[in-house]
Structure formats: structure tokens, C-alpha cells
Amino acid sequence: MTKIYIEDVKLTAVRNKIFSDFDNKNRLNIFDVITLSSGDFLSAQKMIAGDFIVYGGGGFTTKTHNKFNVSYETLGIGRVGARCGCVFKIDLNSWVTDNALYATKINEEFDLNFLIHYLNYKNILQYANTSAQPVISLKRISHITIPSINIDLQREIVRTLNEVENGIIEIKDDKFKIKETFELINSKEMLGIELSHQLDLVKQLRQSFLREVMQGKLVKSTNTKETGQQLLEKIKAEKAQLIAEKKIKKEKPLAPITEDEIPFEIPEHWAWCRLGEIAYITSGSTPSKDSFVERGIPYLKMYNLRNQKIDFYYKPQYIKEEVHNGQLKRCRAYSGDVIMNIVGPPLGKIAIIPDSIPECNFNQAAVLIRPLFKSMNFFVFWYLNEMSEIKAIDTKGVAGQANISVTQSHNMKIPLPPLHEQEQIVAKLEELMGFCDGLAQSIKASQGCNEMLLQQVLREALQGDTK
């Protein structure tokens, strides 16, 4: 919820509270108060940038002209377009186009700014025609009436409304009985800000848990005789066996990790290694358009990675089985594999392919990470979610993009505890993340209630005068 939105709610609600109290006062027809005329047509070809502001159907524009057709300060009303019915101030020496009406004369018993506020309260848009392009005509607004009140009181109302609009109001005597409405919106605004802050704190708590766990600080090993280095040797032996059986290709050796590369301390019985040493890693690919079918092998795109899970049924796509097993054989993925996006922003979209998708394929904006020991997949998933290694990568892409290469994915550093300790870490993280989920759900429920209450205030504010 933006600051501008809240301030608009305040102004509209307070404006309606004040003006509704004058509904039963003596009233004058709008045309007894102001004389309105349409502005002048000005084509883009004839508009010459100059010193004079151009006003249109939405009020102030960013355009200027070298001539003006209104030499005095007055009010305008959007006549055509999306903001049809808006009421705005026109500065002296301005150009008003034929998309707006403007006051050529104002009854001297009325304050200009009072009329602008009051006519906005009247919600003039409601009198527009109902065609695709809403239009306000003089005839359609001819029955609008304006309360005839003392000009000093008008100016007092304007001062109050201007203070609300500028966010500097300090209600003392509450002459217009707006304090309750104003403070209600203020309280909802502050609560909304606090709840958003609490959600940010929950996000920080998640990352704190991940960081502490991956440094070996939240789970104490009960068996330090097994080491991460021993596990790494087993993985290397398994990989050598798979290469000998021609189940995977031999890859170039990865450079050893130097002391300068180590980002944080880990327990002595853990080991540092590169992700490519313990996992099969490959990027995805995009087949030709004729490879896609109504039913076949599920094909993942990055919009299917949502909230660190695979949501395949959000815009599902399928490819032919022969393409999956032929052209895209290299990037076949299976349940339990880790998928990580490598084209951002944002980077850090990571998910494990669920059991509900036994087999699938994916596009070139991601890499597949398949640990040589499948039981390590959740540990790898949570480590990547810790984000420090992803953030440390020099991501270079075209303007506005942040890319991770497949080579950089292979060279990612990862701490390696023994398998039994990885299981303990995963179990602990699932417990901690469940706790964070509960906190977030509770805060979001409170946000929902707060938003409903604020929307109720907004509905009442926007009702305005519909007579």
C-alpha cells in the first residue's frame, strides 16, 4: 500500500465528512456559480514547446506550448478520457485543450479552491456517458448544486483540506468533526506499515536461520568420526564409476578452493568443495515450436518456479516424448532434482522437482543440479537458498539482466557435512521454516483484516455525493 494511496484515502474521506454536513444548506445551481467553456483543440503537430503549461482531460500534462488561451487562474474539469470528471486548478497563462472544460467566470462569493474540493466531492465522473470513451457535457452536469456558505468558512474548509492533502494536519478543536475519521485511517496506515515491517523481519529471520545452520551453529553432530572429506571421496569414487560405465561424461577437473575463497568458517569435520564435484549440472534448452503438444512430457519455464516450489499447473506446457528423449536428452529432469534459475533479476529462484512430476524438461533460463547421492538434494536446495554464494557470483548479462553461467554453477562453493548431519540439518531447517511460515501467515491474516477495514473507509469515502 503506497503512501500516495493512503493520503488520497485521507483526503477523500475527510472531504466527504466535511461536505456531507452541508447537504441541507441553501444551494445554488452550478451555472449560477461558474460559467464553463470548452478548451481549444491543439493537435500534436501544432503544439510547439514553450513556456506555457498544457492542460487536458486529466488536468496537468507534462507538455508545454508557446501560446496560452487562458490568462487567469481558474478551475478545470476533465471532459474526455480516463480521468473524465476530475476537477483541477489551472494556472494563469496556460493552454486548455478541448478535452477539458474551464471556468471563464466564477461567482465572487465563492473561493476557487473551495469549488475545486467541492466538485471533486461531487464525483462528476458519475454523470459521464457510459460509452467506451466517457464524456462530460454541460447538460449532464446542469443539475449539480453547490452549498451557499460564507466565504470565510469556505476558506477555513480549504485550509483544513489542504493540510490533510499535505499530511501536516494537527486537529485541535475538530470544528468539522473529522478527527475520528482521520485517526482511524492513520491507525490503519501505521498498522499496515508495522505489519509490512514484521514480514520483512520474518524474511530476515529465515535468512538468519539458513546462515547459522549452514555454518554448523544450530545442529550439533553426534558423530564426528565421519567427515565431509570422507563423503567427498565417496562421491568422487561414485562419479568415476559412472564415467567408467559411460553413464556420465568426464568433465574437466575443477580448481581447488583456496583459503581466500572460503566465505565463512565451518566445523572442522566438514569440507569445502565445488558444487560440480558433488552433482551433475546442466542447463536447459528450448525446442522448436512444433515440439509443443497438448499432452506429453511436462516442460518447465521460470514462471513455474514460484515461492521456491514447482507450480507446473500455472501455464502448463508439454513437449513431445521423442524430443524429450532425443534433442533435449541432456536436460531431462526427474523428481528430486534441484532446479535453479540462472537468468535474472531476480536470481535465487530454486525448487526441487516434486514426486508428482516423475520426469520433465526445462528451458535455458535454469540449470539442473542432481547430486550424485540423491539424499543430498534437500541440503543443496537449502544451501542455495541461503543466497550468499549466489550473491557472490559476478553476474554479467545484457542491460538489466543478471546471469549465472553453467561454468559458474559448477564452480559454486558449498560446505559438505557428513550425510547423517545433512539429514539433521534438513530436519532442523524444515522445523524452523515451518515456524517462519506460521509467523508470516499470522501477519498476512492481520494485514488482510487491516486492509478490509481500510477498504471499508475507502468505500465510504469514495461514495461521496451521488445525488
Image (tube, rainbow, N blue to C red):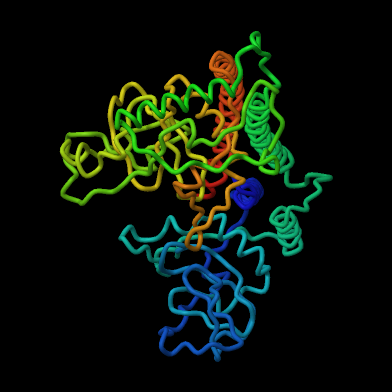
The answer to whether residue 294 is visible is: no
* Residue 63 screen position, x and y as percent: 53, 79
Front-most of residues 14 and 226: 226
Q: Which image quarter holds the N terminus?
A: top right
Front-most of residues 340 and 103: 340
* Residue 297 screen position, x and y as percent: 22, 34
* Residue 160 screen position, x and y as percent: 74, 55
Which residue is at a point 39% across and 29% down the rendered structure image? 337
Q: Residue furthest front?
A: 244
**Left or right: where 392 falls relative to 350:** right
* Residue 153 screen position, x and y as percent: 74, 59
Which residue is at a point 58% across and 48% down the rendered structure image? 393
Front-most of residues 323 and 157: 323
Residue 386 to residue 145: above or below: above
Which residue is at a point 41% across and 66% down the rendered structure image? 81
Q: Quadrant of residue 450?
A: top right
